[in-house]
Image: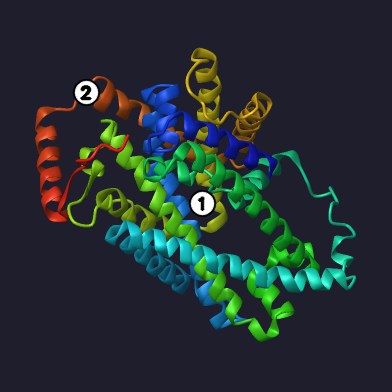
Amino acid sequence: MESSRGGALCYAELGTSFTKSGGHYTYLLETLGPLPAFLRLWVEFLFIRPAVASYVSLAFGRYVVEPLFAPCPAPTALIKLVSIVGVTFVVAVNCWSVSMASRTQITLTFIKMFALVLIIIPGVIALAKGKTENFQNGFELDSITLDRLPLAFYNGLYAYGGWFYLNFVTEEVINPNRNIPLAIICSMVTVTVFYVLVNVAYYTMMTPAELLLSDAVAVTFANRALQGLAAVIPVLVALSCLGALNGGFFGSPRMLFVGAREGHWPLIFSMIHIKRHTPLPAVLFLYPLVVVMLITGEIYQLINFASFSRWFFIALATLGMLIHRYRFPHHPRPFKVPLAIAVTFTVVCFFIVGLSLYSDPWNTGRSCALTLTGVPVYYVTIYRFRVPRRLRKVFNYCSKQLQILLEVAPQEVQTY
């Protein structure tokens, strides 16, 4: 929780220091150079965004399907099919209209807050009546080992994640120097309060063992605390997952869009639809990777798989912020995070990603190896540009045909 707040404050400084869209990519490019920035694009497209979208959509599918089969286990194939339907809907919305995607996000956020309030109220009432037995031994440390620590951090950090999505769309924010820090700080306070209260509500009605055994915690909670609304809670939680999925697809393609605009990614990704003004290629080309990972993956494996590279590059971005501060002390910084917070957050992130290689060597090792595959790609395609002429002709022909097929063109108005 404290780490996420520290990271959010660091990104508030980065967002006001560099007012381009692109989030992690832009900050790495401005502070540490093109290679780390390209590697961030590489892993974002190859597996971070597909993995994140996959486990959120799997949660959506689970909350839609499991209540229909309770108390029997729901068919895995059906859960994945419904998950694919959810991803397809979100991709279609983000390809169709920017305003529709933003309105959808606002609506689903209000639904999410309503669902959280419905969960919090009965839990707080039960707690006020003295139902505290599940908290008596809530902090027993017998089962905690050092090797489990980073994986626990990854799950906790994911719960508080999302504070960097606004940095992906900085150029679309009115008065970013004021509104980015304000939005990040207000949202982190709100998320912290609601997350703590929801967990208090859960532990009031469920033991830690029951909570760990449940695949859909909100469904188990509703069956105990909200018998009259037990059928409503899973629907609200599913819509909440859809909101998280939509937020990811709204922000993440902007990183690929900006990377292509800077010449570090295929040019087709920097194009927008000539009528709808959406970054259609950047959204659409992520879709098949998400579907493949969704079909082959499982929620907790996907979280560990994506989290290593995700948090490694976040740590690099905040390290780059500290280096940039030292090298360019007079660079305008409308918002400045205290040095102790920035250093602590950076050290904690590097510690977590380093220890996770020991905790879960298979998933984090794959993530690390796939990240490193981007190094030769960078030197061949960008640094030296030694792509064979025939291959370049094929690539340019395919790009041109895709541009015609998708009705997209380069951005005309400079927004940075």
Q: Residue at position x 15%, y 39% from top?
A: 395
Q: Can residue 204 be seen?
A: yes
Per the rendering, the mark at residue 385 is 2
Residue 168 falls in image quadrant: top left
The residue that mark 1 highlights is: 302
Percent position (x, y) of residue 265? Answer: 28, 35
**Closer to us: 17 or 346:** 17
Q: Within 10 angstroms of label 1, few (less than 14), some, or many (20 or more) residues?
A: many
Residue 247 falls in image quadrant: bottom left
**Closer to us: 100 or 66:** 100
On screen, 242 above or below 196? below
Q: Residue at position x 84%, y 49% from top?
A: 142
Percent position (x, y) of residue 204? Answer: 80, 67
Q: Within 10 angstroms of label 2, few (less than 14), some, or many (20 or more) residues?
A: few
Quarter in which the C terminus is drawn: top left
Q: Can residue 215 be seen?
A: no
Give the CA distance from mark 1 to mark 2.
33 Å
**Closer to us: 368 or 306:** 306
Q: Amino acid at mark 2?
A: Phe
Percent position (x, y) of residue 91? Answer: 34, 60
Which residue is most to the top? 327
Left or right placement of residue 87 versus residue 228 in this view:
left
Q: Residue at position x 90%, y 70% from top?
A: 130
Q: Amino acid at mark 1?
A: Leu
